[in-house]
Amino acid sequence: MQNARITLHLIKQRMQVRANGILLVDSTQTFELREQGYPPRQYFLREEVRMDLLTTSDTTTHCPFKGDTVYFSLGDNKDIAWSYEQPIEGLEAIACKVAFDRESLDAECVMITQMGI
């Protein structure tokens, strides 16, 4: 998806996210959302995220460019992740995927090398 404000890109890297040393996600199927004025955010498939460790927060927000947001916490770490359950038209690719607040977590990117045949 491309528009003047937001672009989505499929990442060809292995992405891992940890909080307090706990691996929350290890994925090679990540979308990176780039929005003017904000740092890039990676959105992970929910089935790859350790949702059993996260609890739904009372926090909700609305973005006029993406839609309504649901937040998740990990113990005392409040609102470390979020999801757009029903994003606005044109951003369906991030529906129900989970993004993490990388500023408050340990995030690691590991490049995947493609092997030739």
Image (tube, rainbow, N blue to C red):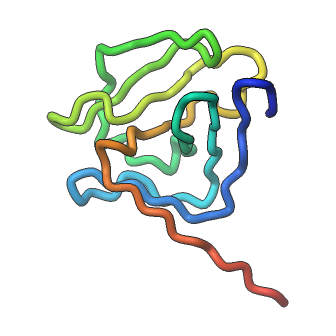
For the residue pair 111 and 5, the one nearer the viewer reads as: 5
Task: Name the residue located 62 percent from the left edge and 18 percent from the top edge.
Answer: 66
Task: Name the residue located 72 percent from the left edge and 46 percent from the top edge.
Answer: 9
Expressed as whole percent of the image width and height from the top left, the position of residue 70 reads 43, 20
Corner quadrant of residue 31: top right
- Image quarter where the N terminus lies is top right
Q: Which residue lies furthest to the right in this view?
A: 117
Expressed as whole percent of the image width and height from the top left, the position of residue 48 reads 50, 50
Looking at the image, residue 99 lies above or below residue 66: below
Task: Name the residue located 62 percent from the left edge and 74 percent from the top edge.
Answer: 112
Q: Is residue 89 left or right of residue 13?
A: right
> How many numbered marks does the figure carry?
0
Q: Is residue 59 left or right of residue 9?
A: left
Q: Residue furthest left?
A: 76
Expressed as whole percent of the image width and height from the top left, the position of residue 43 reads 56, 41
Q: Is residue 100 left or right of residue 75?
A: right
Expressed as whole percent of the image width and height from the top left, the position of residue 26 reads 47, 60
Task: Name the residue located 34 percent from the left edge and 58 percent from the top edge.
Answer: 23
For the residue pair 16 and 86, the one nearer the viewer reads as: 16
- Image quarter where the C terminus lies is bottom right
Corner quadrant of residue 79: top left
Q: Residue furthest front?
A: 37
